Image (cartoon, grey):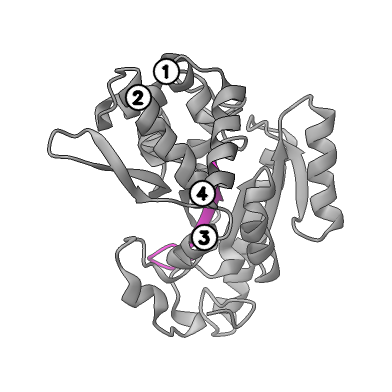
Amino acid sequence: MSRHKKPEIALIYDFDGTLAPGNMQEKAFIPDVGMNKKKFWDKVSELSVKHGGDNVLMYMQLMIDEAKKNEVQFARKDIKRYGRGLKFFPGVEGWFKRVNKYAKAKGLSAKHYIISAGNKEMIQGTKIAKEFAQIYGSAFRYDHHGIAVGLALAINYTTKTQYLFRINKGALDVTDHATLNAWTERETRKVPFERMIFLGDGASDVPCMRLVKQQGGFSIAVYRPGSSNAKAESKKLIGHKRVDFAVPADYREGRKLDVAVKHRIDLVAATVDFRESIGWGPGGNSGDVE
């Protein structure tokens, strides 16, 4: 490939259950406020039913309330610190550099993104935060002392798709609604859907999985290695035509996930070359979704 600017291929991830096992609040925050994970999530469900509310909003508000009640420090820096202790699935920490190198050899520029209902600040505190071009996650609002006092942004399973279009159009700033909602020629969009790879693990990821697949991209369901129940649930997504592939969340070189992503990169690179050879340019979506 002789182009100067390499076309972008976007790898887009959920976080909890996709890159890291479990829910991020469970490792340290929930024990710090004197609860166990069952009690915490049962309380979230109770509040959601009581107020007819969204469970993402409820879990975030419960975090603020429990931290205050139990005199647990809950400034931005404290929340980021919770992220530092999170553990990942096998191979995750070396994954990004390896994928970037492989894509570059194929004439592409790999960029990584997070779209998660989990907490943005915790993800920002992890060892892998620097690997992402953008982290979209549910975020708190802070007072002048940096203490979390309210909610700024909540991302749930239906709103996740908004951020696919932000990546698609290059409108990465969450406050930039004009670019996001403006009509844009498919050929001029920054990252066509066919150059997206979405990785998720569960029901909250289904709208993103389905949208990316329907628009010509590649959707992968990952599941906890060794869990027969999780494997069965992921396999159902293939039968329902919501994903292209279901594999263990094992990011090590040569494993099924690694092989699948590299094959998709090969296909994207070949498609870009073909389009350029006949004068179509490097991009182009597979549908008219706005």
The nearer-to-camera label among 3 and 4 is 4
Q: Which residue is mark 2?
A: 67
Q: Which mark is residue 159?
A: 3
Question: Is 63 placed above or below 159 here?
Answer: above
Q: 10 Å neighbourhood of mark 2: few (<14), some, or many (≥20)?
A: some
* Residue 194 higher or lower than 80, as above or below: below
Residue beneath label 1, please?
33
Stretch in magenta: 1-15
Sequence order check: which comes first, mark 2 or mark 4? 4
The label nearer to you, 2 versus 3, is: 2
Q: Is residue 2 visible?
A: no
How far apart marks 3 and 4 lie (CA) works out to: 20 Å
Q: Earlier in the sequence, mark 3 or mark 1?
A: 1
How far apart, in angstroms, are the residues tagged by discs 4 and 1? Answer: 23 Å
* Circle nearer the N terminus (2, 1): 1
Alpha carbons under labels 2 and 3: distance apart: 27 Å
Question: Callout 2: helix, strand or loop?
Answer: helix
**Is residue 80 depicted above or below 156 in this figure?**
above
| Secondary element at tag 1 | loop
Q: Which mark is residue 230?
A: none
